[in-house]
Image (spheres, helix red, strand yellow):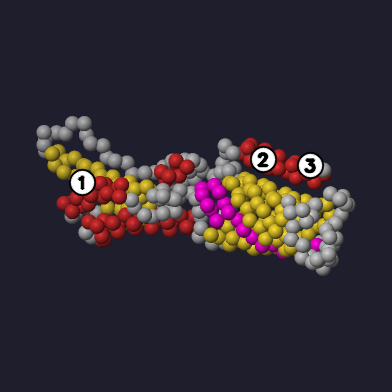
Amino acid sequence: MRKSSVFLAGLLFATSASYSVAETDSKLYLGLGVSSLALDGERVLGVPTSSPGHAPKEFNVILGYQFDELWAADLTLGTDFSGETSADQFMLNGYRFFGSSKWRPFVSAGLSAFSVDEASDDSTQQIQAGFGISSALSDNLEFRAGYQLFSELSGDSSFDKALGISLNWHFGKPVATAATTQPKPVPEPESVPENKEVVDTFELLVEFSFDQSDITSAYEPQFKEIAQVLSSSPEINMTIEGHTDWTGTDDYNLSLSERRADAVKNKFVQDYAISADRIDVIGYGELRPVEDNSTAAGRARNRRAISVILRPRMVSE
C-alpha cells in the first residue's frame, strides 16, 4: 500500500507541475519511461537471490529542467511492474549533452535510493553514472535512451546496472530576443509625375519544412518572376537571407539557415542560368524570427529564405 501511495503522489506532483507551466515559456519537461534493471546477486532488498542478475522492469515518471542546450537535471520516480521486486526507485540525475546534430550523446551522474514495501527499513542509497543519446522528435518531444551503473554508498561491493528509454515533453523555450527585422518593400508613390523614376519591388519568400532545405514546386512562379527581372536587368544583384526557428543549437541553426539560402541561390543558377557572382547569401540562424516561436504556426513562418530586389525605371503620365 505504501509503495502505491508514494508512486501516485509523485505522479500527481509531476502532472500538476506540468499543467502550471504549460502556457508559459518554462524550461520544465515531463517524461514517461521504462527501464530494465540488472541487480547484483548479492543485494539485500527483499529480492530472492536464487539466481544472480535479477532484471526487474520499472515504469518511470520524470520531472526535469533544461537549463540550456548543454545541461539538464531531472527527478525520476520508478516502480516495478514485472513482479520480480516490490521496490520503488527514486533518482536525481544531472546531464551534460554534446554536439549540435539531431542525435546528441550525453553523460549523466546522480544519486538514487531504493525503498521496499515488505521491509520498510530496508533501503539502499546509491551513486550512479552513465551515458546515452538524445534526439528531438519534434519541436517539444524528446527521445532519450541511456545506460547507468549504480554503486552503493555504504561501501559494499554490489553494483546494479540499468538500461532505460523515455519520452520527454518540453513545455516551452524562451522567446528569442533578437530584433525581428525584415526587409520592407519600398512603396510606390500614389501619383507619378511625368518622367519621374519609380522603383519596382520584387520579393521572394520560401518556407521550409522542419530541419529541411528542400524547395517545393509551389514557389516556381516566384523564382520565374525574379529570374526574368535579373535576366532583363544585368546591373541588378541580389542577396538571399536564410532563417530558422529556435529548435536546435545556435551553431546548427546557423548552418541550416546558410544551407537554405544556398538552396535558393543554386536554383537560380542551375534552373535559370543566373550568374552565381550576382547572388550573395547570408544565414541568420534563429536570430530574426517574424513570428512567435512558441507556437507551431509561428515556427513554420520562421523557417524561411527571403530576398528583395529593387528595379528603378522611368515612367510618364
Circle 3: residue type: Ser
- Mark 1 — residue? 311
Span highlighted in magenta in the image:
135-152
> Between tags 3 and 1, which lies in front?
3
Badge 3: residue crowd in 10 Å (few <14, some 14–19, many ≥20)? few
Q: For residue 107, say whether it is visible.
A: no
- Mark 2 — residue? 15
Residues tagged 3 and 2 counted as in contact (Cβ below 8 A): no
Q: What is the x, y in percent for residue 241?
A: 35, 52
Q: Which residue is drawn at 87% across and 54% down?
A: 122
Mark 3 → mark 2, Cα distance in angstroms: 15 Å
Toward the viewer: 162 or 179? 162
Q: Residue at x 71, y 39 (%)?
A: 12
Toward the viewer: 281 or 151? 151
Task: Find out whether residue 139 is within the magenta segment.
Answer: yes
Question: Where, quadrant-wise, is the N terminus in this rendering?
Answer: top right
Left/right placement of residue 160 relative to residue 173 reads right
Q: What is the x, y in percent for residue 159?
A: 77, 65
Task: Find out whether residue 286 is within the magenta segment.
Answer: no
